Image: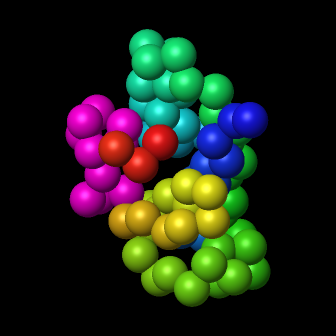
Amino acid sequence: MPTEIKILHASCCAKGSPIKAFIEQIANENNLEIQIEEFSEMSDTMMYGTMVFPSLVVNNKVYDFKQYQTTEKLLSIL
């Protein structure tokens, strides 16, 4: 079963950010099965209760991407 990841962007930021490519690269290098969705509309991001962007939602738990932007830290939540 793939790990479900949602990338929450601020409404001013476009989808297709380098964050998605970074996560995909780490997943490929570590043979992890993932499913990624990106959201930038305020109505979509508000349901996760965060005002910190970008954020990651991994299996329904919210993480501040700025605290998990290294390969090692990102792997720890995937």
At a point 37% along the width and 37% down the height, the residue shown is: 75
Is 16 or 35 nearer to us in this picture?
35
Which residue lies at the image location 42% right of the left edge and 65% below the top edge?
A: 63
Picture quadrant of residue 54: bottom left
State the image quarter where residue 48 is shown.
bottom right
- Reply yes or no: does residue 62 show up in magenta: no
Instruction: Give the image location of residue 21, x and y in percent.
Output: 51, 29
Left or right of 25 on screen, residue 41:
right
Task: Give the percent coordinates (x, y) of residue 31.
Answer: 53, 16
Looking at the rendering, the stretch of residues picked out in magenta corresponds to 65-75
Query: 31 or 23: which is nearer to us?
Result: 31
Please name whichever residue, 57 or 38, is drawn nearer the observer in this view of the structure: 57
Q: Quadrant of residue 42?
A: bottom right
Q: Position of residue 13 (x, y in %)?
A: 54, 58
Colouring mode (rainbow / by chain / secondary structure / one colour): rainbow
State the residue at coordinates (41%, 75%): 52
Residue 16 can be seen in this image: yes
Residue 9 in view of the camera: no
Vertical comparison of 55 with 27: above or below = below
In the image, 36: left or right of 17? right
* 10 is higher (above) or lower (below) than 4: below
Q: Up-down: is 36 above or below 13? A: above
- Residue plotted at (43% across, 30% down): 22
Q: Main secondary structure of the magenta part?
A: helix
Give the position of the N terminus as an image quadrant.
Answer: top right
Q: How many marks?
A: 0
How far across and down, in percent of the image, does residue 43 sit?
75, 80
22, above or below 9, in the image: above
